[in-house]
Image (tube, rainbow, N blue to C red):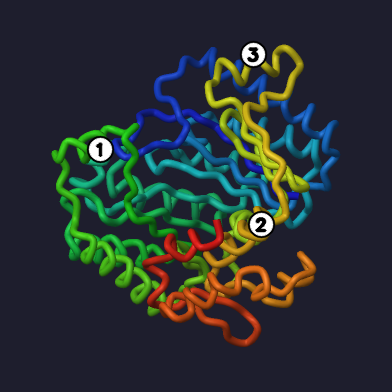
Amino acid sequence: MHLYIHLPFCLKKCNYCDFISYAGIPRGQVRRYLAALFKEMELVAARFQPRKISTLYLGGGTPSYLSGEELLDIIERVRNIFGIEEEAEITLEANPGTLTPKKLELLRLAGVNRLSLGAQSFDDALLKAMGRVHQAKDIYQAFYWAREAGFSNINLDLIYGLPGQTFSQWEDTLNQAIKLYPEHVSTYALELSIDTPWGRRQMLGDLLLPAEEEVLSMYGLACQKLKEAGFEHYEISNFARLGFKCRHNLSYWENQDYLGLGAAAASHWRGKRWQNEIAIENYCRSLEEGKLPVAEEEELDRRQKMGETLFLGLRLRKGISLKEFKDRFGEELMSVYGPEIERLVSSGLVEIREGRMVITEKGLPLANEVFLAFV
C-alpha cells in the first residue's frame, strides 16, 4: 500500500509556491497537528484495513522543518499502526537549509532511505529572488551530510523558466547537479498561480519571464544532458539512474490506490477520491471530535477511471500498454478513444508501437494538450 503524509510547515513561503503550506506556525500548533495526524492514522487504519506500507512519502511544505525526533515519531507511528514492508521505499522531502548531520542520522535510524532535496537552483541570485532560505553552498553541504549519514538514494529538485534566468544559468545548474552524482533528478518548468507573490506580479506585467521558446530549449537541454550523464528519462519531468525510479510516484502515474494523511492530503482508494480539510484548524478540530477530516469526496465513474489511467500513464515514457488497458477495463483502447487517439497520432504527438501508446519527442513539451484529450 502507498501512503502519503502532508506536513504543511515551512520556514518561509517561496515567491512561486502555491502548495498548501504555512510559515511561522507556533510550536504548540505543530504539536496539535501531529496529535491530530496520529489520530487520523488510527481512524484510517481501522476503516480501510490496508496492507502493509510499500512506499511512504513525507511531503510538504518542508517536512525537514520538523525536528528529527518528531519525524522519527511519525514514522514509528506508521510502522506500529499500519506496518511497513521490509523493502519499503521511505521518502522525505527536505530543504537543504533545514538539515543537520544529527537530523539526517535520526532519519536513517527511522528508516528513511530516499531523500528529496529541494535544490531548485545552484545560482545564489536566483535562489534569493525565489525566496529560498538556502544558498548553493547549503545544497553541497546537505548532500555531503546525507551521504555521510548513509543515504544512497538522493533526488534533486530543479526549476527552470525562472524570472531573469538565462539558458547558461540553467546549464550551469544542470552541470552542478550532475557533478554531485545524485540517483534521481526532477526538473520542473515554473508555473505560477495568482495566489503567489510572483503570480500577482505576473498578472500586473511586473515579472520578466523567459520566452516560451527559451523555456522549451531549457527542457530540451535537461533531457539531453541528463541522458548523457547516464540517467533514464522515465517520466516527463523525472530522470533516474538504473534502479532508482521513484516507486511512490510511479504508484500515482500507474493510477494505483493510495491513501493520504494530513491537511489537504488526497486519497484514491477503490474507485473513490477524496481530499482532507485544507485549513489546519478545521483538520485538527475534525479529528479532535473523532471524525475523519474529509472535505470533498467523489465516486469515480468508469469513463473517469479510464481517462485518468491514460493521462497519468502517458506521463511515463513507456506509455500505456494496450493489453493492460484491456485487462483492466475489459475494452480495447481504440474502441473507447479511437477518434482522440487518431487525432493525436496524426498530429505527431503520440504513437502506437510494440503494443503501447506513448508520447513522442514532439509531444513531450505539449503533454498537457495530449492529456486534455482524455479528460
Residue 70: image quadrant is top right
Which residue in the protein does label 3 denote? Answer: 285
Location of the C terminus by quadrant is bottom right
Looking at the image, which residue is at 61% across and 21% down?
Answer: 283
Q: Are marks 1 and 2 in contact (CB under 8 Å)?
A: no
Q: Judge whether 65 appears above or below 253 on screen.
A: above
Q: At label 3, which amino acid type do we have?
A: Arg
Q: At label 2, which amino acid type do we have?
A: Asn
Q: CA distance from mark 2 to mark 3?
A: 31 Å
Q: At label 1, which amino acid type do we have?
A: Trp
Which residue in the protein does label 1 denote? Answer: 198
Looking at the image, which residue is at 47% across and 36% down?
Answer: 62
Q: Position of residue 282 (x, y in %)?
A: 59, 17
Q: Judge whether 71 appears above or below 347 on screen.
A: above
Which residue in the protein does label 2 denote? Answer: 255
State which tag comes first along the sequence, 3 or 1: 1
